Amino acid sequence: MAVTILPLIQAQITLYGMSTLMILGNIGNIIFIILFYRRRQNSCAMYLLCAAIVQSATLTFNSVINLYGLNYSDPTVHSLFLCKFRAYITHIWNQTGRYLTVLACIDRYIWTANNAHGRLINRPSTSRCFTIILFLFWHIFSIHIAVLVTITNGICSSFGVYYVIYQVYAATFLGLLPPILMSIFGFLAYHNMKKLHLRVRPIGNNGDDSIITHRRDRDLLLMVLTEVVIYVVTAIPYPFIVLEVAVTNYIGVIKSSQRIEIENFLNSIALTLFSITYGSRFYTYFAVSKAFRKDSKTLFIKWKNHVLERSPINRTPRVRQL
């Protein structure tokens, strides 16, 4: 029996927060994927496009499982296969999406670095290669989850020494490393962009030493930097919460029911904040980029015209010939 109101609040956040995030997030991700699919020849856009796809899959899968578990029994505690599959596959999707965003930051840094050799990395073929390598890497590097996660006492999780190891691993590779890398390369890209604005460069085909700063590329950099800020803010609580819980559990600290409920609530809030980044990309870019708003408006008008053209009301009736 709950000793605080926190489990009830946690359930309401899952019910209304996750369902709203799943609906609005997937709508935004679908529009984003359509818009950026047209720009897939841009290496940075390619990374962000792939990140949106895998994060939308993660958001949908996790939300459905969590919402189902509120009204019915959690299916992952009745099937060892589903327990391992959910932990493993969602981790792969999560990490791939996060580190694709890291690659997007690195891509923008290289784009602004005025380095002829480095700009070879900005090629679409290179971005596709890096995306495949990253996806395969997390399949292999995360195999320990599929092996060691199990069901014990009706709970699908990690246990024993592996529990502590996994929490340290999660805090490092989920909560600390991505925002640190994003911040470093985002700051360097912003610093390089400021230097580019201070230089006067000729426009034309003047060799590799001449760089034309395109408006869409600048907008793309602005969008990536804004996403970095949001990710850093939402990721800050997670590593500290999971490490505190893992260390205190491992050393055998006796916890009251109230403390356990507080820890579970804080962990749930941290994971919910993480989930916000899975569905907020479209709305973030729409807020900060005039060019993105223009592209979105053009797409909406195109859809509207397409619907009106197919409407029976707007069809011109044919005149029968006698």
Image (cartoon, rainbow, N blue to C red):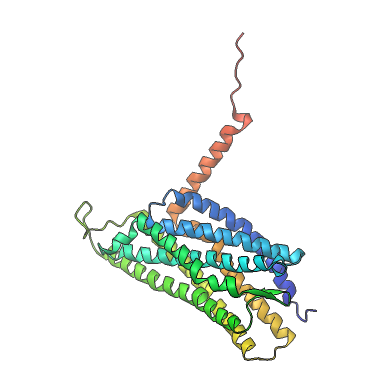
Q: Is residue 298 above or below residue 77?
A: above
Give the residue furthest to the left: 206
How many marks are shown on the rendered structure? 0
- Which residue is more in the foreground, 203 or 97? 97
Quadrant placement of the N terminus: bottom right
At horizontal 31% and vertical 68% (from top left) the residue drawn is 192
**In this orientation, does residue 282 appear?**
no
Q: Write down the quadrant of residue 191 in the picture.
A: bottom left
Q: Residue furthest right?
A: 1
Q: Position of residue 20 (x, y in %)?
A: 65, 60
Instruction: Give the residue displayed 58% in from the left and 83% down from the top.
Output: 164
Q: Nearer the viewer, residue 39 or 120?
A: 120
Q: Is residue 122 left or right of residue 209?
A: right
Image point 54% across, 81% down: which residue?
168
Q: In the depicted view, which residue is nearer to us: 286 or 99?
A: 99
Q: Quadrant of the C terminus?
A: top right
Q: Within the image, what quadrant is residue 247 found in?
A: bottom right
The spot of residue 3 in percent (x, y) is 78, 81
Residue at horizontal 47%, vertical 57%?
Answer: 50
Instruction: Choose between 313 and 126: the one closer to the eye.
Output: 126
- Residue 278 image position (x, y, % from top left): 55, 63
Q: Residue 283 location in percent, x, y?
A: 53, 58
Residue 52, can we see it? Answer: yes
